Image: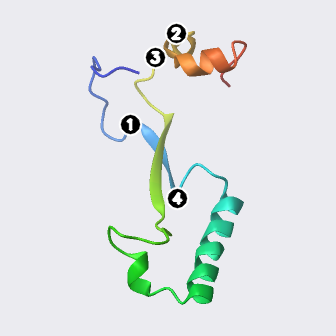
């Protein structure tokens, strides 16, 4: 949890899990599916030229966004530091839920 690590991890460590999600926004997946069908329906009903869906002058935006999440699940060089998360917790989480305990 630092921009200036004090060690170089050994080969093969850490082990990470990568989650790849393709969504347009932070809305849940059901809203995303409804939005895509809505765009399709508008295209069919209004006879929108497919070119209007592309480029800078889009009429309807159905472009997905891909996000990547990297989770370290194992590290041979890990040194437990109790309270590290609490000390470095983003302020907005502290304000939203002062009793938050990470698990």
Q: Nearer the viewer, residue 48 or 77?
A: 48
The structure residue drawn at horizontal position 41% and vertical position 21%, both measured from the top left corner, is 1
N-term-proximal mark, 2 vs 4: 4
The numbered disc on residue 87 is 2
To which quarter of the image does residue 31 belong?
Answer: bottom right
N-term-proximal mark, 1 vs 4: 1
Check the image and name the residue furthest to the front.
Answer: 46
**Foreground tag (2 vs 4):** 4
- Mark 3 lies on residue: 79
Relative to 46, is 103 above or below?
above
Q: Where residue 48 appears, x then y in whole percent?
A: 50, 85
Q: Where residue 97 appears, x then y in whole percent?
A: 70, 18
The structure residue drawn at horizontal position 46% and vertical position 16%, both measured from the top left corner, is 79
N-term-proximal mark, 1 vs 2: 1
**Foreground tag (4 vs 3):** 4
The structure residue drawn at horizontal position 41% and vertical position 79%, both measured from the top left corner, is 52
Labelled pair 4, 3 in contact (Cβ < 8 Å): no
- Mark 1 lies on residue: 13
The structure residue drawn at horizontal position 48% and vertical position 64%, both measured from the top left corner, is 64
């Amino acid at each position: 949890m630092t921009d200036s690590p004090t060690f170089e991890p050994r080969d093969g460590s850490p082990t990470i899990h990568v989650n790849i999600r393709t969504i347009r926004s932070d809305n849940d997946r059901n809203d995303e599916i409804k939005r895509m069908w809505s765009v399709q329906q508008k295209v069919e009903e209004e006879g929108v030229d497919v070119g209007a869906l592309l480029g800078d002058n889009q009429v309807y935006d159905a472009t997905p966004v891909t996000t990547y999440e990297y989770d370290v699940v194992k590290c041979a060089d890990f040194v437990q530091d109790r309270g590290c998360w609490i000390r470095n917790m983003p302020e907005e989480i502290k304000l939203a839920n002062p009793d938050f305990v990470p698990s």
